[in-house]
Image (spheres, rainbow, N blue to C red):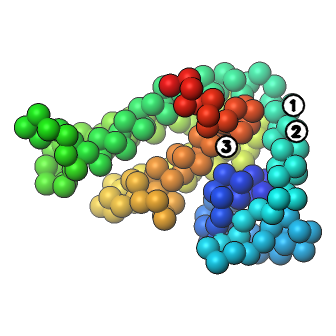
Amino acid sequence: MDHMLQVLHVKGRATLDALATAVQADPSDAVAAFVADGLVEDSRLGYKLTSAARSRVDELYAREREQVGPVVEDVYASFGPINDEVKQIVTDWQMRTVGGELTVNDHSDPGYDAGVLDRLRAADARVPTSLSPLTVALPRFGLYPERLGKALSLIDDGDHSMLAAPLKDSYHTVWFELHEDLINLTNRSRADEEGAG
């Protein structure tokens, strides 16, 4: 369960419930062991990594980088266009142009919202194929399409908060974590990403 340290690194901090959702397993014993080893601490808002855990996380990513080799760059290249689409879809869900003016989407136009959700479904359908070369080598990445699928299923069932709610395992939350995980695995940084546009 070492990869739970990577999950915490990506999340920043998380409750046991949030960790259970992310790793699809009961994290209690692993978290207790990490706390005992001084790698994780409990804070008011959930568990977080200690400074001592940073080098361990770096080692985990370095080991995975070695394990997957150049595959990770191919995956990252195929992920980029989907990432751009998903970011635009989330923006379009939150904002829309009315009478030539950009305004907050009040979700009063079901046709507009349905169109945005259709685009999300189309983008989501490409994720498993994009990630598959990586998930063969690192099965933990297979949890992301499952979590995205669960969020999408809840959206389709009418819970539209599951598209972008920051405090839930919403589509956007999981997407951000997937992107962050890939950034770390490719030894990039958010600053590199911003610079690349």
Q: In 3D space, how far apart are the residues under numbered discs 3 and 2 (Cα atoms)?
A: 14 Å
Q: Earlier in the sequence, mark 1 or mark 3?
A: 1
Q: Position of residue 117 (x, y in %)?
A: 31, 44
Looking at numbered disc 3 in the image, what kind of residue is underneath it?
A: Asp
Q: Residue at x 19, y 46 (%)?
A: 103
Question: Which of these two is toward me, 130 or 195?
Answer: 195
Q: Residue at x 36, y 61 (%)?
A: 161
Question: Which of these two is toward me, 104 or 90?
Answer: 104
Q: Residue at x 42, y 60 (%)?
A: 165
Compared across the picture, whether 166 is left or right of 56 comes to: left
Looking at numbered disc 2 in the image, what kind of residue is underneath it?
A: Arg
Q: Earlier in the sequence, mark 3 or mark 2?
A: 2
In the picture of the structure, the residue carrying the numbered disc 2 is 63
Q: In 3D space, how far apart are the residues under numbered discs 1 and 3 (Cα atoms)?
A: 16 Å
Q: In 3D space, how far apart are the residues under numbered discs 1 and 2 (Cα atoms)?
A: 5 Å
Tell me the crowding category of disc 1: few under 14, some 14 to 19, or many 20 or more residues within 10 angstroms, Cα based: few
Q: Are marks 3 and 2 in contact (CB under 8 Å)?
A: no
In the picture of the structure, the residue carrying the numbered disc 3 is 181
Tell me the crowding category of disc 2: few under 14, some 14 to 19, or many 20 or more residues within 10 angstroms, Cα based: few
Compared across the picture, whether 158 is left or right of 7 comes to: left
Res 8 → quadrant: bottom right
Number of numbered markers: 3
Whether residue 126 is situated above or below residue 144 in the rendered picture:
above
Q: Position of residue 36 (x, y in %)?
A: 90, 74
Question: Which of these two is toward me, 29 or 133?
Answer: 29
Q: Are marks 1 and 2 in contact (CB under 8 Å)?
A: yes
- Residue 66, labelled with which disc? 1
Helix, strand or loop for disc 3: helix
Compared across the picture, whether 154 is left or right of 77 comes to: left
Q: Considering the image in quadrants, where does the N terminus appear?
A: bottom right
